[in-house]
Amino acid sequence: MSSAIQLALHEPKTWQEFHPNTEMIVTRKRGRVIFPHLDYLISGLEPTSLYSVFVHLERVDNVKYKFDQGEWQYATKGDPIREVQYYEHPHGARSGEHWMSDPVSFASLKITNDPMCENPKLIIVQSMHKYQPVVTIKKIGNFRGEEFRLKVTEFMVVTAYQSNHVNDLKKKHNKFASGFRAERGEAKRTPSTEFCSESSSSTSSYSPGIENFPAQNFPMQTNMNPFYPAAPINQFFDFNSYWNPAYNYSNPWNGYQNVGQIPMQNGFFPTWQHPQNPILEEPNQFQPILQTEDQNGTTLGNL
């Protein structure tokens, strides 16, 4: 089934300056904003239909890297892949017209490398591993979700910048560049951009005053995507027969729109699939749609 939905970066040139040298995001246990920000342009939605937009971070491969002689190289087998954490855009469910009228910013998204972190506003990542941001657009009412992967946004997770070139680009583009410059052997940091705590609240750069929506842990999948880790750029799923337990707005059991509690999970409820969660025995039931991507990160027609 074809889709008219397209997603592109709002400022692709910034990401292209880092790519293909692989964007590196410094992480701290208290959380760090992704920079360049994940700001997107969405088109092809039905103007009056309601949609929610999510982002999650997907491991690109099962490799742990090292930076040697000016380039990233294989170091060893990657750490065990963690379950996916979904981060919903703070606006929640809005009309297609709303999402298409302005850039959709995930500037409030923060990441941490603390595996014991319990702050629901942070997504846990693993240092020295490569990640791919994945955007999911879900139309409310029919349980269809479409995923978009823009290769130019891949990044390596590090605790300190390994490349002087990347460090220079950070200073060039980030208005809080002083947070990256060294002073007396230690990096100066800007608390408003580098760290967060349980009580802090970051907002979308395009929508002041909107609270963060916590990252969500979806339960174990029923199948494994056969394309993982080389996942397709654009994947179209039909969720009509699958209950998404973290999705409040509508589900086939409560009969309500935009309200109502989520039913308790038990063995009779099928769970939402995702390729990054643990593998089970069943073969994959979904047939993905592969789409090409131009140099600006815009998805094009079906292959």
Image (cartoon, rainbow, N blue to C red):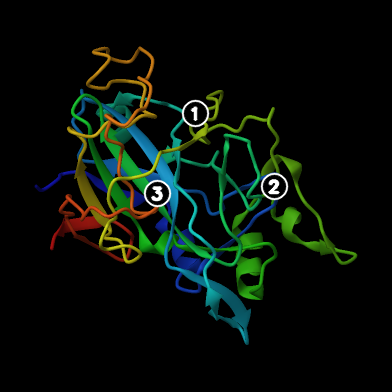
Type of the residue with mark 2: Glu
Measured from the top left, where is residue 290 in percent x and y?
A: 19, 59
State the image quarter where residue 243 is shown: top left
Secondary structure beneath dot 3 equals: loop
Q: Amino acid at mark 1?
A: Ser
Q: Is residue 2 left or right of residue 167?
A: left
Mark 3 neighbour density, 10 Å: few (under 14) some (14–19) many (20 or more): some
Which residue in the protein does label 2 denote? 194
Give the number of the disc on residue 207: 1
Q: Earlier in the sequence, mark 2 or mark 1?
A: 2
Instruction: Please state the horizontal and vertical placement of residue 218, each as a whole percent of the image.
Output: 41, 38
* Residue 89 higher or lower than 296, as above or below: above
Query: Residue 10, which numbered label?
Result: 3
Circles 2 and 1: CB atoms closer than 8 Å: no
Residue at image position (45%, 68%) is: 62
Q: Secondary structure at mark 1?
A: loop
Q: From the image, state whether disc 2 or disc 3 is nearer to you.
A: 2
Q: Earlier in the sequence, mark 2 or mark 3?
A: 3
Residue 278, horizontal then vertical, whole percent: 39, 53
In what element is the residue under mark 2? Answer: helix
Between 105 and 266, the one lying in front of the other is: 266
Q: Residue drawn 30% across and 44% down?
A: 273
Residue type marked 3:
His
Classify the position of the C terminus by image quarter. Answer: bottom left
